[in-house]
Image (spheres, rainbow, N blue to C red):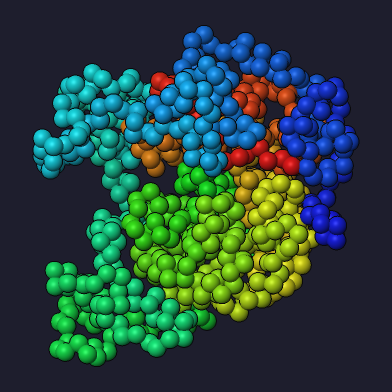
Amino acid sequence: MCMSGSRRHGRPGRLSCHTPEPVRGASMAEVAEVAAESGGGGDSGVGACERGVAPIKAQYRTTKERFHEYLDADKQEGACQETPTEGPAEPEAKRIRLEDGQENGKTEVAVESHERQVPKRARGQNKSRPHMKPAHYDKERLCPSLLQESATPCAFGDRCRFLHDVGRYLETKPADLGPHCVLFNTFGRCPYSMTCRFAGAHLGPEGQNLVQEEVVARCAQLPSVRNGLDRALQQQLRKRQVCFERAEQALSHLTQGPMPTIAPESTVATLTPKHSSCHVQLDNVGGDGAGQGSPVPTCGPLTDEDVVRLRPCEKKRLDISGKLYLAPLTTCGNLPFRRICKRFGADVTCGEMAMCTNLLQGQMSEWALLKRHPCEDIFGVQLEGAFPDTMTKCAELLNRTIDVDFVDINVGCPIDLVYKKGGGCALMNRSAKFQQIVRGMNEVLDVPLTVKMRTGVQERVSLAHRLLPELRNWGVALVTLHGRSREQRYTRLADWPYIEQCAKVASPMPLFGNGDILSFEDANCAMQTGVAGIMVARGALLKPWLFTEIKEQRHWDISSSERLDILRDFTHYGLEHWGSDTQGVERTRRFLLEWLSFLCRYVPVGLLERLPQRINERPPYYLGRDYLETLMASQQAADWIRISEMLLGPVPPGFVFLPKHKANAYK
């Protein structure tokens, strides 16, 4: 058995396929400093002062001062002058303010607080994080009506808040970031026209937007990104005019009350004669019309789609046993990143966690999390919610509007914002609500329903093994178990012996394991526990080529230039997804920087004394085999910004970045 560890003493187990070796080539003071930063968690087999430190070969080890001296010596004069030189890359407690004397774009309230010398209390981890929205980078934005090919005048007229003077806009527009436009080269036409930050590639001598007809015709035949939110549906959701017949029926069954009459009064909003006939048809199909007087006229054919439904045994089955599952990663698990992982061998992908209440309100930012790229052949979405009515209605809405292979319920989110409202991990302690959510969603969905959960809420009180038989009886098709509790967050190693116990309890329902997979050895040991497959989360953020390593059973000593090419592909995918104007470029930069806050933790294979690197080992200061490899190992946000400038050009004035996620959990 590859897994070891004892739950009797309250210590989670760990992947123990590797024999650790002591770290050599570093002074005791240096190792102690790094170990203190890492928190020293996890039994790695090395000395107490060296615990949690990646064993890098002696010839590459260095000190913090020499590391930054090396990076600063090769820095080009004038580069990154607008960015702080000592950015707060990964502060111990996620400080909300930068060090004194640094430019951080404080608001007026923060300036007044600084003048009064009264420290502002930080409430929450990210509420006051210095972050500028991409829309604020453009002081004068051009009206979208001027970018449309049809000469339609602006609907707002003189009341429009955007600029209508093209000449004035071009005078104030920042310089182009490069000679090639990704959208123009890929699709044959750039919809951002003169607002594109690479406009020189596709603007004619008279300022007209050029079009490559052959490329446009070829791209028109290719499948496009799916699961967008229709404007008409968005308006109906905002006005609460969408009917949820199946959800209402499912909820009435769960509460064991009398079956309500499916009438306009039972919908989300009361319908009036002003509503379109299609709404009336949706609300009355399947209703008995009792007490309604004369029947309401409908348009179109009357079908039995809402009466004859799929039985549980007739649902599409989710057969992904043995496949590599990319976890739904908040912020970093966006569509461009998933495209990168698909290219390296990920089999199953899932969208970021989406709040069901925001989806029901028609929020575009939330619906964007559901988008699916054509390369994602097995794709699901993850929903978060705390109440059966909203979760069931959201499931019905998605069932008839988007194209997915499965829907996942988030029962593992540990953050307070979700937990205190009764969602995420809190559902593990609310079995009655949890059951109603699962049964209700399962009744209205035509695709399989899955659940992602943790071992429990408290570290020493595991709940998953009790819930798994219930989930199997409630109709869940698959469960993914993260081997940590909410209390642990990401401290200590995942408890794989407990996952092994749960895999036996869950049988014949497939169980996927998740936690600390960073090499093909880790994946092999995990599969020996009897799980149906493994889910990769942080390991994919540290090295997205992990899927290739697992499938080819090898360690990939990837070069720094190859890693930069991966980042370049990400920026291209990001510009395709978020746009090539200033707003799209800066949004792409923001997500790239969030990813770089994880990528810096990767240690190249050729620098390690023993293989493989473990996910709980913090890399000490080291000099890589070339300058770029050293730059990619920096823990400073200013150096991450320098990497982004290689790909997306200089940052705007006053730009500041602080990572959203607490990526330095090495305990």
Q: Residue at x 75, y 37 (%)?
A: 39
Q: Residue furthest top?
A: 77
Residue 356 spot, x, y in % from top left: 43, 60
Q: Residue at x 54, y 42 (%)?
A: 124
Left or right placement of residue 344 versus residue 522 in this view: left
Q: Is residue 632 visible?
A: no
Q: Residue at x 39, y 26 (%)?
A: 108
In this rendering, the count of numbered labels is: 0
**Would you place residue 272 above or below residue 525 in this image?**
below
**Would you place residue 42 above or below residue 102 in this image?**
below
Q: Quadrant of residue 21?
A: top right
**Front in this rendered view, residue 224 or 136:** 136
**Would you place residue 119 above or below residue 151 in this image?**
above
**Front in this rendered view, residue 652 or 159:** 159
Q: Quadrant of the C terminus?
A: top right
Residue 522 spot, x, y in % from top left: 75, 50
**Would you place residue 427 above or below residue 283 in this image?**
above
Left or right placement of residue 26 versus residue 258 in this view: right
Q: Is residue 492 visible?
A: yes
Residue 191 spot, x, y in % from top left: 27, 38
Residue 413 spot, x, y in % from top left: 57, 55
Q: Quadrant of the N terminus?
A: bottom right
